[in-house]
Amino acid sequence: MSQTTAPRQLHLNVNILHSGFIPSAWRLPEADPLAFTDAAHYVKVARIAEAAKFDAVFLADNASIIEQIDFRPITALEPTVLLATVAAATTHIGIIGTASTSYNEPYNIARRFATLDHVSGGRAGWNIVTTADPGSARNFGLDAVPDHGGRYARADEFTSVVKALWNSWEDDAVIGDKASGRFIDESRVRPISHRGAHFSVQGPLNLPRTPQGQPVLIQAGGSGDGRELAARHAEAVFSAAHTIEESLAYSRAINERAAALGRGPHAVKILPGLATIVGATEAQALRRRDELVDMIPWSYSLKRLAGTLGIPVERLELDKPLPADLALPNGGNGNHTFFHATLSLVKSRAHTVRDVIRALCGGGGHRVLVGTPEQIADEIERWFKAGAADGFNLMPDALPSGLQDFADGVVPILQQRGLFRTEYVGRTLREHFGLARPVNLPASSAQAA
């Protein structure tokens, strides 16, 4: 009797960028300007996403103020604390938070995300970042950002230590036998005894293995070092791409390297960022985009674009093309991902700076889809069926309204086409993503290895 292979499952996360992806979203009549520090706002967005059967909500993070706060809300609330609140108000949706390997310690991060996995019943994921902005460096006692290669070498060791701590308890270490009075089998709890170039950690972790075995590991980085980190550790990658060809090449590079490291042929799920503006008609969607972009001061957008490109803002003129001699920001020690994504946008045809800002809805780097639910569903299906994406990290123009528009208009079309779930099958983030539970070697085998 032959076995049939289950069809690929589209994955959808929502990136809760406080009031929305477009910087002016907080100015909409229905928006609350104080939503960026209101836990109820994030809970409301998460509940809309859960009702639409999304895989997860995602929170970015910064260790400093990197936004122009005279105009835009900032990423202010610490993700794991906020996600614990979201977890208590939901039942199925995954909760992914960002934490930097540059300005934390492995033990604290291992404990924090293991706690989040326990209290959510197995729904936690960690987005691994290395942090490249000068403000964060100064907030942690450094005069400059550590060099790119050094940051990623630290991140690799950091992540290895976190994984070892998560696996320092075997699944059946907790006995809790009232009759015998035996609580924990100490032979199944082991130190990790790590001594490395950056960290010295004895272990074990001070809480048992989590419902998922370990939280899901996510990474976001487009540089060579970032791809290597993803290939070694990530189970999903949040990427930035403007074309199918670009995303296919990125996916191949990550997964071929992961396979060479013994992780299998398609170990890493590729989830490009996708900003959406949904309208009943294409004209309505374009009108909404233009209204939102026109509420952004051009000075703000110019500074944001200049920061992405790593050049003085004086080099940008609204009605002239981008400078031709652009090089990686800060001598290669800046953000590679959005620099390359922005240049990718202008490859197909000549763009003025004004065109670029409008296309990016304020100077960001991710792809923006503007159109009807059918048009947006068509593009999602096209990328998914081409193998350029396993799903998308969705960034609605405004929150919660833009997500509700997507949930009401686009999701039913994807479901009708058999691309997206109509009900949750499992309860954990691993089950949503179709990821196996990591095997934990018995103490004797692990020590021998």
Image: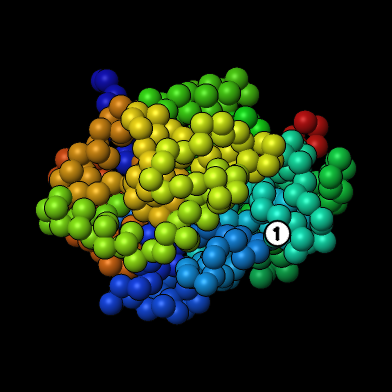
Q: Residue at x 86, y 40 (%)?
A: 197
| Front residue of this view, candidates 356 and 59 | 356
Disc 1 target residue: 136
Q: Quadrant of the C terminus?
A: top right
Q: Position of residue 327 (x, y in %)?
A: 60, 33
Label 1 environment density (alpha carbons within 10 Å; few <14, some 14–19, many ≥20): many
Image x and y of residue 182, in percent:
73, 64
Name the amino acid, label 1: Ser
* Residue 352 figure quarter: top left
Quadrant containing the N terminus is top left
Q: Residue at x 41, y 45 (%)?
A: 353
Depicted 231 relative to depicted 147: above or below: above
| Lateral position of residue 402 relative to residue 14, left or right | left
Q: Position of residue 446 (x, y in %)?
A: 75, 37
Q: Tell me which residue sits at (14%, 53%) in the image.
A: 283
- Does residue 96 appear anywhere in the picture? no
> Which residue: 51% across, 36% down?
323
List x then y, in percent, for residue 190. Answer: 79, 49
Element at badge 1?
A: helix
| Corner quadrant of residue 377 | top left
Rendering colour mode = rainbow
Return the residue nearer the eye: 353 or 141.
353
Q: Is residue 136 visible?
A: yes
How many marks overall?
1
Name, please, the residue furthest toward the left.
281
